[in-house]
Amino acid sequence: AKNHPCEIYSKGCRAKPCSRRKIESALEVTKRWLGVPECVDWTGPLYQSANLLAHLYFCLEVVHIPAWLVNVYFLCDPHSPTNREKWQAAIARVKEEMGLTGITVPHTAELFLEAKERRELDIIYG
């Protein structure tokens, strides 16, 4: 779940060389599965998103466990408000940067939920 588009980005994969080779191999297999060009770097700022896709691939294609990847985006978070239009523009940018434009990733969904102040939740849920 993300409250603001900036949260999608990270410092990238920071694994040690031995682990990094395994990670890069898993990401390459996942890119082939989805039809993403090899030249697209998934170990940079969008590594977290790429890693989630690699886990989805592993569940569906390697161990044959039914799985879904649901990305949850909060709308109008009081601390960093983002409306649906801004989210959709940010998601399109992320997909482009990951080489996923025009690619339907199986077993994925995007869920948009309106954020609430903690005091509002206390009133609702007591």
Image (cartoon, rainbow, N blue to C red):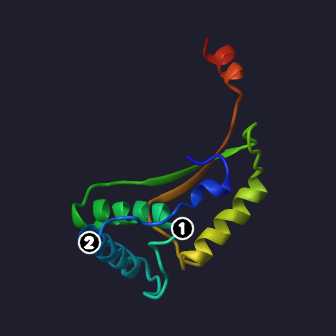
x 24%, y 60%: residue? 64
Extreme-front residue of the structure:
16
Q: Give the x, y percent position of residue 116.
A: 70, 31
Q: Position of residue 57 (x, y in %)?
A: 34, 66
Amino acid type shown at disc 1: Pro
Indicate the quadrant where residue 25 lies: bottom left
Residue neighbourhood size for the residue with mark 2, other residues' Cα within 10 Å, grouped as few (<14), some (14–19), many (≥20): few
Along the horizontal axis of the image, is 32 left or right of 4?
Answer: left
Going by the image, does 98 lie left or right of 74?
left
51 lies above or below 123:
below
Q: What is the quadrant of the C terminus in the image? A: top right
- Amino acid of disc 2: Lys
Mark 1 highlights which residue? Answer: 45
Numbered disc 2: secondary structure = helix
Where does the image place residue 45, in percent across and percent down from the top left? 54, 67
**Percent position (x, y) of residue 108?**
48, 59
Outermost top residue: 126
Residue under circle 2? Answer: 22
Report the residue at 50% width, 52% height from top: 70
Residue 93: which quarter of the image? bottom right
The residue that appears at 51% across and 63% down in the rendered structure is 11
Query: Which numbered dot is residue 110?
Result: none
